[in-house]
Image (cartoon, grey):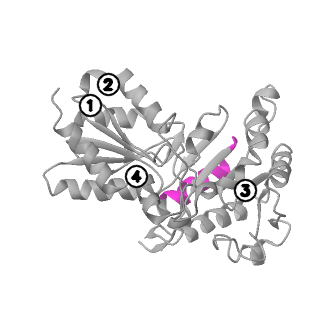
Amino acid sequence: MREIAFRQALREAMQEEMRLDKNVFLMGEEVAEYNGAYKVSQGMLEEFGPKRIIDTPIAELGFASIAVGAASNGLRPIVEFMTWNFAVLPLDQIFNHASKMLAMSGGHFGCPIVFRGPNGSAGQLAAQHSTAFESWYANIPGLKVISVSNPYDAKGLLKSAIRDNDPVIFMESEVMYGDIGPVPEEEYLIPIGKADIKRAGNDVTIVSYNKTMKVALAAAEELSKDGISAEVIDLRTIRPLDIETIIRSVKKTNRLVVVEEQWPYGGISTEITYRVQKDAFDYLDAPVRRVCSADSSMHYAANLVAAYLPDVPKTIKAVKDIMYAVK
């Protein structure tokens, strides 16, 4: 199978869907003439023209509003935010309009729209450009939330998101756009709401998503050297949450660690912990542990960035703490 970059996988997903459906279009800051801030939309202006690849002003609330209106009238917009940190401004459109359109219209018309862009930290970008937003949007009924970790999943899930009739939040990462991975040349779709077991194991379940999947997989590899077999699950979709896959794994391994870039208060790990203790409490040999970002803003200094983010040593410690816990 060929190997391509994460950004190319996203580009191919958009190109293929735009060729299939003339109602699909892309809009956002620098997506056209500049080929995208991260070169995800490179070459798309030449193929589809300025009516379908639309450069916008630096006005996220404004162009999100245009997209919601377009989606309500039969089009299928893809909105690229340069970072989800800038999407705090159009949250009113996403929360009060896109997510509620189907309910407020009595089921007569929905809002088929994809909001996508990089999410979370990307090095020393300091407090205002480093927030992970999955838990914010997962808290909103009417939205579907996808957070991908590799080129294969990115392409298959973005195609499914574009075809979906509900508003979809699609989370990427600035530090993954150059990642290379296998992606088939033939068309494929990945269903929304289905997690994937990236590594099988028997002793502990590690659940993660987006770029912290790299942390989870690296920790699992290190743990194997100590004879600990970790099963690693990539959520891929945050809402709807594939809790069944997690429960099946926990019933086999009897232990669970959740690794995520969210703040610890009210994060995705909190929801997973509740669901697991509700449906698989008798199978747990130790309390569920989580490895999150620090409960603070992320500062600029490199040593504070390292202290703030989940990493392999923190994950290994969490696993060993519950591996050797006395029930």
Numbered range of the magenta stretch: 153-167
Q: Nearer the viewer, mark 3 or mark 2?
A: 2
Indicate which disc residue 251 carries: 1
Residue 109 quadrant: top right
As drawn, the label of residue 125 is none
Q: Position of residue 144 (x, y in %)?
A: 61, 41
The Cα atoms of the two marked residues, 4 and 1, are separated by 25 Å
Q: Answer yes or no: do the residues labelled 1 and 2 have beta carbons within 8 Å?
A: yes
Determine the secondary structure under disc 4. Answer: loop
Q: Which mark is residue 310?
A: 4
Sort mark 4 into few (<14), some (14-19) or many (20+) by Cα contacts within 10 Å.
many
Residue bearing mark 3: 78
Q: Label 4 amino acid?
A: Pro
Mark identifier at residue 280: 2
Is residue 309 something that shows in the picture? no
Tag 1's secondary structure? helix
Q: Mark 1 or mark 3: which comes first in sequence?
A: 3
| Residue 169 position in % (x across, y down) | 64, 47
Extreme-left residue of the structure: 227
Residue 248 included in the magenta stretch of the image: no
Q: Is residue 300 visible?
A: yes
| Secondary element type, mark 2 | helix
**Is residue 192 rendered to the left or right of residue 75?**
left
Amino acid under label 3? Answer: Ile
Q: CA distance from mark 1 to mark 2?
A: 7 Å
Mark before the other along the chain sequence, 3 or 2: 3
Classify 54 as above or below 200: below
Q: Which numbered disc flags the more N-terminal residue, 4 or 1? A: 1
Residue at x 61% of width, y 62% of height: 13
